[in-house]
Amino acid sequence: MNAGAGNADAVNAGALTVIEAGSTQVTDLGRRRGPRFGVPVNGALDQRSARIANILVGNPETAPVLEITALDAEFVADIDILIAVSGADGHLTVDGVGRPTNQPVSVRAGEAIALRQIQGGLRSYLAVRGSFDVPQLLGSCAPDSVLGFGGRLVVGERIALRTATAPVFNAHFTAELYDLDVPRLPTGFIVDVTDGPDLDDFAGTADRLFAQPYLVTPKSNHIGLRMTGPLPERRTHGEVLSRGVPVGAVEVPPGDELLVLHRGRGVTAGYPVLAVVTSGSLDVLAQVRPGQHLRFRRLSASDAAARARAELVELEALRLRVRSVFDALDALSTATTGRTLL
């Protein structure tokens, strides 16, 4: 399981240099092959936002992105690039000029890209057209703190870029030529769950999960969120053997906290699983800050599947809109200059 370098066949066009690191790491949608080797999936905690950022710049959804958590960050590229930022709201500037999030944004070589004042959530995602050439482990660049792979970026670090993208500006207004209707983060922290395998162990107390809000504690991280509130009580007394558990498992360990496992969770665990968070609500959990409250809501397995399908349709519609814009820009550029722009 050696970490390979980036694609040896790729010719790097330039690099993105970290000027202010904050709490930023390079990641992707996770290590899908990991669990069979006992390795956590990890990856972007808000996968919907990471997908949107990549879609907006025309990348595959699985391409590496920058996950920027809570703190300000700043970067400079030595080539012209096209970027997009999605996820929690933040103040995006290019060379000090405010630019829109959830839209493709052109950046000229040497201009500073800054994301500050992240609010309304915890994590934002920055994608670059062509993405980054970074090391991988089991087919993913997602950091893994246990294995010592990847980690937070540091000031001065250079991340190899695969593609230069000429600026796309309206010559009269210095503004991009497109305005895309992008799905926004849901308002309020409502976390949908389906029934877990150990639901019956909690007899008449399981509904406490839905009775009142839960407070997310500072001990929460990418492995799991710990929260306080009205705890269901396990009525059976048999030992729960260590076994495979899904991402999103809502566990009730001994003590006074509820534990919800996230993408960095270990592959096995031994606490009773009361419920399982839906795939879409895992993205909601990724945006909840310690000290904020959330509420759980029960969904049937069929309703959860229907919502997951609807989210995929929504992202596919965005992908088609972006593709049509890029195709139109290429056609316009070819007609006027004789060369492809994007």
Image (cartoon, helix red, strand yellow):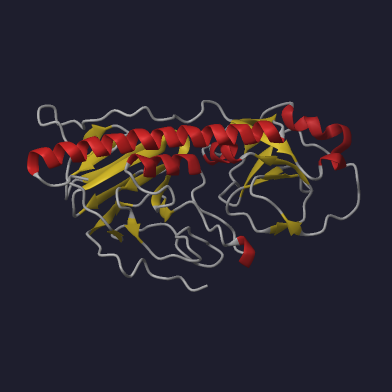
Tell whether 169 sits left or right of 304.
left
Q: Position of residue 195 (x, y in %)?
A: 75, 38
Which residue is at a point 57% across and 30% down the rendered structure image?
189
The front one of 70 and 280 is 280
Is residue 128 placed above or below 150 in the rendered structure? above
Residue 60 makes an appearance in the image: yes
The front one of 81 and 212 is 81
Which residue is at a point 63% across and 64% down the rendered structure image?
36
Is residue 264 placed above or below 134 in the rendered structure? above
Q: Quadrant of residue 5?
A: bottom left
Q: Quadrant of residue 58?
A: top left
Q: Position of residue 33 (x, y in %)?
A: 56, 61
Tell whether 68 sits left or right of 171.
right
- The number of numbered badges drawn on the structure is 0
Task: Tell me the quarter of the image containing the C terminus.
Answer: top left
Residue lying at the far bottom of the rendered structure: 2
Tell whether 165 sits left or right of 193.
left
Q: Quadrant of residue 190?
A: top right
Tell whether 86 sits left or right of 236.
left
The front one of 221 and 300 is 300
Q: Position of residue 277 (x, y in %)?
A: 65, 40
